[in-house]
Structures are given as C-alpha cells and as structure tokens.
Amino acid sequence: MPITTLSSRELNQDVTRAKKATKDGPVFITDRGRPSHVLLSIEEYQRLTGSQQKIADLLAMPGLEDIELDIPRHAELARPADLD
C-alpha cells in the first residue's frame, strides 16, 4: 500500500488531491518536514479500529425522537429487594 506524503501547505492548496490519495493508502501530513497527522478513508479507519456503531450513537440519530418505544413490564421479574 503506497503512502502519500503532503506538507500542510500542499494539503491546504489541494484538499481534493489528498482525499483522492486515501483511496490508495494513508496520507501523511507534515509540519516543517515532520509527520504530524494521517489522513485515512473512512473504510480504512473502520477496518483498522474494527469500529462498530455504538448503541448511544445509533440512538442519537436524527429522526428517532419521533419513534415510540413501549417496553412491557414483566411482573414476574420485578420483586422487592431483600435487605435483611
């Protein structure tokens, strides 16, 4: 997998080039000649992190506030706490 290296100035001048380069591999961004950041495609990031969506993120999606959720209570599961 080829690695593309761009200076911060090159990145600012041609963001599209940097985004397209992520299709081939990571893009290293340098500040004063030293690597400072890495730009990845979202697919590569998800592959590397093994990230899956978290329930909190899914519940925070727009439009879900209009969905009613009726969770029935099960009387056989609820009982008073035994504090003795």
Image (tube, rainbow, N blue to C red):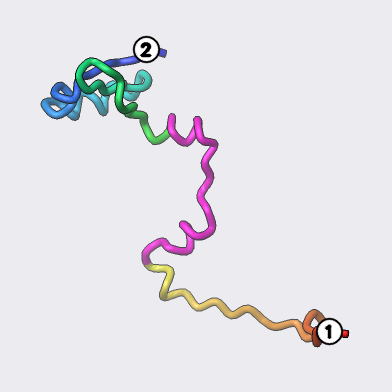
Foreground residue among 69 and 32: 32
Measure the alpha-carbon separation of dots 1 and 2.
Answer: 64 Å
- 83 displayed left or right of 60: right
Residue 23 falls in image quadrant: top left
Of the numbered discs 1 and 2, the one sitting upstream in the chain is 2
Q: Is residue 19 above or below residue 60?
A: above
Disc 2 residue crowd, few under 14, some 14–19, many 20+, Cα 10 Å: few
Name which residue lies at 34% across and 27% down: 38
Residue 83 percent location from the top left of the image: 83, 84
User: Does the magenta run of residues contain 35?
Assistant: no
Residue 43 falls in image quadrant: top left
Q: Is residue 43 above or below residue 68?
A: above
Residue identified by numbered label 2: 2
**Tag 1: amino acid:** Leu
Magenta residues, start to end? 44-62
Residue identified by numbered label 1: 83
Residue 58 percent location from the top left of the image: 48, 58
Name which residue lies at 36% across and 22% down: 26
- 4 displayed left or right of 75: left
